[in-house]
Image: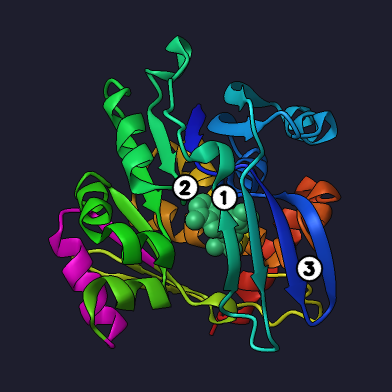
Amino acid sequence: MSVLVVGSVAFDTVRTPFGHKEKILGGSATYFSYSCSFFSRVNLVAVVGEDFPSEYRELLMERDINLDGLQVRDGKTFHWGGSYHYDMNEAETEFTDLNVFEDFHPELPYHYRSSEYVLLANIDPDLQLEVLDQIDNPRLVVGDTMNLWIELKKDVVEDVIRKLDILIVNDAEARQLTSEVSLKKAADQLLGLGCKYVVIKKGEHGALLFSRDYIFSAPGLPLETVVDPTGAGDTFAGGFMGYLARSGDLTPEVLRRAMIYGSVMASFNVEDFSLERLKKLQKDDIKTRFQEFKALTNF
Ligand code: AMP
């Protein structure tokens, strides 16, 4: 089963208390795809400029990520700059150079159009809608967003949420979208827009899954090494969605396990910059860390 993702493929310039890196590989679709590829095949939709190095493209292809939907346009690749302080739960955006994304319109290759699993990673919500319009009859649509788009285009973000089965946001975004302090009330309001589940990520403190009938809490695993949280949310979404697509089911048990697989993948990602940690990841590492998550809250 393959998952279609639209989002950013980017250069990131990142400063954390543990280092400063210029123009490393990033982007919401990049992190998502790489993480998801440990569970399912991925079809990627995005745009890069002519400056996008072929090594980065090969890195994605090595994991069997289909790049037929990755357009290459005249101009520069999207470039995001962000920094973190010792509380690394929230990134401070220093700049967002949309570059080739400014006049990008996704055109889905024909064989992408029948995709059953669709992940709208963080990108301009108008582009998320353009992708959905080109898909015939998706079985599961999951979406993410960020503070910039809620600030600039809240109405469009809400239009996207109305079309989702599952919304994934972080705690700050849930509060920004709903003007509620209580995450329970925020989730109820977001469920009221029509999606079936809302996932609220809380950085190092784990993540919550809300449905109309139950709540599930995935713990945050206390890690010794946290170097760069960039992409943690997208890596979470990759493990979560990849596992759902592989299972082909949406029972409460499957959703709970998907929350843990998402958390497992994010916990690896924060241990190094860019995709450095995920590049070394083996299937057995995933299994072992899944068990560590299980042991952490078993009583
Ligand atoms: P995350 O840490 O999971 O929230 O996402 C980090 C990634 O989002 C970085 O690699 C950035 O390149 C990407 N990003 C940052 N701002 C935007 C934006 N406005 N649109 C799309 N992607 C973005």
Amino acid type indicated by mark 2 = Ala
Q: Quadrant of ligand 1?
A: bottom right
Mark 2 vs 1, N-terminal side = 1
On screen, residue 76 above or below 293: above
Q: Is mark 2 within 8 Å of ligand 1?
A: yes
Name the disc covering residue 141, or none: none
Residue 230 x %, y %? 66, 64
Amino acid type indicated by mark 3 = Glu
SS type, badge 1: helix
User: Does any portion of residue 120 appear in the rendered image?
Assistant: yes
Q: CA distance from mark 2 to mark 3?
A: 22 Å
In this orientation, which residue lies closer to the viewer: 167 or 196? Answer: 167
Asked where in the image residue 41 lies, by quadrant, the reply is top right
On the rendered structure, is 226 left or right of 193? right
Mark 1 vs 3, N-terminal side = 1
For disc 1, the marked residue is: 28
Q: Are marks 2 and 1 in contact (CB under 8 Å)?
A: yes
Give yes or no for residue 198 being in the magenta stretch: yes
Q: Residues within 10 Å of mark 3 (few under 14, many from 20)?
A: some
Q: CA distance from mark 2 to mark 1?
A: 6 Å
Residue span colored magenta: 181-199
For disc 3, the marked residue is: 271
For disc 2, the marked residue is: 121
Q: Which residue is rendered at x = 61% and y = 40% of the image? A: 33
Extreme-front residue of the structure? 75
